[in-house]
Amino acid sequence: MNGRLLEAAQTGNVGILFELLKAHPLALHAIPLTSNETPLHVASMVGQLNFVKEMIGLKPEFTGKLNQDGFSPMHLASANGYLEIVRELMKVDSSHSRLSSGDGRTPLHLAVLNGRIDVIHELLSSCPESVEDVTFNGNTTLHLAVLNNQFEALKVIVEWLKQHDKEALLNWTDKQGNAVLHIATFTKRREVIELLLGKDTVISAGAVEINALNECSLTALDIVQGFPIEGANYWQIEKILLAAGAKRAHDILHLVSAAPNASGEDHIDESTAPSSSSGTLFDGIASTFRFQKGRDSPSEVRSDLLVVAALIAMATYQAGLSPPGGYWQDDNLPINANSTNTDQPHHAGKSILGTKSTFSYGLFLFSNSAGFYMSIYLTHVLTWRFPLWLELQMCLFGMAITYFNAMVQQSPGVFLVTFDIYAGVVQLSLPLVFLGARVLYEKWRRTHPSPSNYSLLKLVASGVRLLYVKWRCRHRSFNCGQ
């Protein structure tokens, strides 16, 4: 674009514009050949109303042209809140209010993002269909208002939807299946949730689907309880949701599976319904505490695993240095065959349990070492590429060598020393064994899908409960036939 023409558009100097056109009558016609940015884009962005009017009169087709960033003059005027310029552009073609930018945003989206209330009113009244436009991520104007903390803009749109019988848009979802209620609970926007579900809401009763599931199978209540925060907002949000009838996802699934079918008989989905009261308890606990992608933060889960691994390492290391029974405090070697000493021969510093019971000591040593070396391996994996990673690995390696040396030194007899070395080799190879087993298991799962989760654990729980009932029948005097 000509430098003087750019200056005229920025300052709104119409005189310079006409001087340039007098000297170069085809100057405006040549702009599309050299640039996507027109004087109308520049004047709309900086709010030069008179210059915009002149440009519209000279080149009305510029109103629908997108610049190198994918924005039309309507986008730029709406984002900056220039209401009069928006009106002038709408006179040319009201459909320009639905022009989509490079990322799918319309002028109404930009007005909402920046809280331009007057422009929002104008665009909705001039082109009501624009409220149905979504971005490439599936975000509606409602999503954008909540995500960008534009509560006043949200109120305007919600009231407009109520007046024009378009409240169904409140339940439109983005590509992750999140409706505006999901977004509001995830960002802990109490005022938004009150607007949607509170006692003084203008929205019709039942218009908001409070128990809708997103792509992660989470309801709004799942989100607020799965990502708690400190402060009063959390409890107030939860109170509002519960008062409106919000439920957890697993509660909804249980209700659906137990709902009567068309013939009036109860229908229970065998793949999800528990076979006994113990199964119900187990399902509830498992659904509440198991890891779920999208609900649980990977960084928080990693931190929790690091804490558990550190506790296991500390407990097993201490147990290895203080074995059951302790250590011999003196040497006891028979001087001759006629010695009357009845104690077993031993050396100071050796394990008493290892001297008295080779099997018990070997079982303790192998099990304790398995826990210790696996906790070291978990720490290694969970801290991969951390700052000072190499220094941390040296510390872990040193601790593992110290533990192994301590086990060798405290074990009595050549057999137990050999067992120590064998156990150390086995423990160090355990991570590779588990890695291979996990790969094989994942391949098996893809080719042999399980009909239900936790089926083995459910079977074990049912078996334990059956054994308990039989035990009670044998030791208590009550009717076991019922």
Image (cartoon, grey):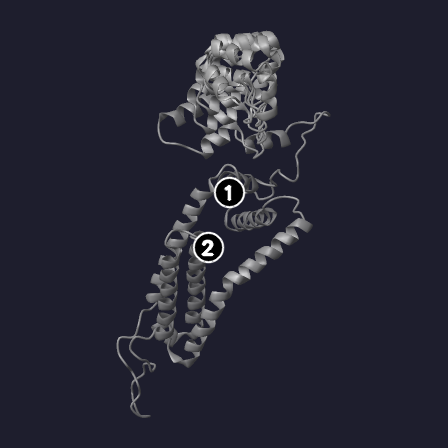
Mark sitting on residue 337: none
Is tag 1's residue or tag 2's residue first in the polypeptide sequence? 1
Residue 131 visible? The answer is no
Q: Nearer the viewer, residue 68 or 446?
A: 68
Which mark is in front, 1 or 2?
A: 2
Q: What quarter of the picture does the C terminus occupy? A: top right
Q: Nearer the viewer, residue 291 or 66?
A: 66
Task: From the image, tell me which residue sits under label 2.
Answer: 381
Residue type, label 1: Phe
In the rendered structure, the answer to whether residue 213 lies left or right of residue 411 reads right
Looking at the image, the residue that sits furthest to the right is 263
Q: Of the residues shown, which amino acid type is indicated by label 2?
A: Val
Name the residue nearer the viewer: 294 or 149: 149
Q: Where is residue 394? Give x, y as percent.
A: 37, 62
> Residue drawn 51% across and 20% down?
110
Observer-nearest residue: 329 or 445? 445
